Structures are given as structure tokens and as C-alpha cells.
Image (spheres, grey):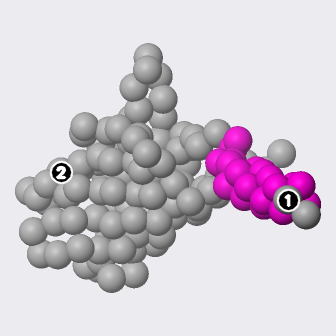
Amino acid sequence: MKIVTYVVLLLLISSSLISGQPSNEKKDPVGKWLFAAPYAPEGYTAGTIEVGYSEKKYSATMTFSVGENKFIGDRVRFENDTLYFNVFIEGQDVAVKLKYEDKTKMNGKAIYTKGVVPLFLTKEIKKE
């Protein structure tokens, strides 16, 4: 009876360890992301964020659908599945924080002096 109990206990522990292992998916924010910011001021509700990686450093460029200005990200980093950067828009420093959900989705927020704006991103997939 003791052997059966030990076997069952061993199986339970083994299955919980196997199911609790992290995914082997490489988390990579590099690419062109389309974003929606439905609660942002007019003119800033949609656009793209291009994330690059070169010489062991990340870069980010934000462009809005209205207008042609590109805003270069400052202090760009990707840590613990989260992309951080700052952009300077209309005299204000805007802190952007984006959580990498999967290879086609990131969500986060832009923080500026008038509040917090939710951001929803989908990766632009190149059609071949």
C-alpha cells in the first residue's frame, strides 16, 4: 500500500513540474507594430511603433496615422517581457510601457502629464 501511495505522489509531483515549465518561445519585440490608443487625444489614437535591435541595443520609433512626424524612442529596453521607452511629443515626455503577450500582440500604456492612455498593439505580418 505504501508503494502505491508513493507512486501516485511521484506522478502528481512529476506532472505538476512538467506542466509548470515555461514556454520555449523566444520573446522578440522586433518588428513593425500597429497600435490603437482609443482614449488618446485626437490625432494620436493610431499609428505604428517600429522596434529594432542592433549592436546589442533596442530602438523604437513611433509614428502616428495623422501627420508624418516620427518620434524616436529614448532609453529603450526590453526586460522581463516588457518593452520600455520614452518619446518627446509636443513638449512632453511620454513614457511607454508595453507587455509582450505573444509574437503578434503587445498591450500597455503611455503615461504623460495629463494621464495614462491604454495601448493595444498587433504585429504587422509581411505578406509573401
**Where is 84 relative to 99, above or below?**
above
Q: For residue 24: magenta?
A: yes
**Residue at the outermost top position:** 55
Residue at 37% over, 51% down:
62
Mark 1 = which residue? 2
Q: What range of the chain is rendered magenta?
A: 3-25
Q: Does the magenta stretch mainly form a helix, a strand or a loop?
A: helix
**Residue at the outermost front position:** 1
Q: Secondary structure at mark 1?
A: helix
- Amino acid type of the residue that numbered disc 2 sits on in the rendered structure: Phe
Residue at 24% over, 39% down:
74
Q: Position of residue 108 (x, y in %)?
A: 39, 65
**Where is 37 relative to 95, above or below?**
below
Q: Position of residue 80 (x, y in %)?
A: 43, 45
**Where is 47 relative to 50, above or below?**
below
| Quarter containing the C terminus | top right
| Left-right relation of 13 to 42 | right
Residue at 91% over, 63% down:
1
Q: Earlier in the sequence, mark 2 or mark 1?
A: 1
Q: Quadrant of residue 114?
A: bottom left
Q: Position of residue 32 (x, y in %)?
A: 55, 48
Nearer to the camera, 108 or 51: 108
Mark 2 = which residue? 88
| Left-right relation of 77 to 22 | left
Give the alpha-carbon distance from disc 2 to disc 1, as whole Å: 67 Å
Q: Position of residue 112 (x, y in %)?
A: 16, 66
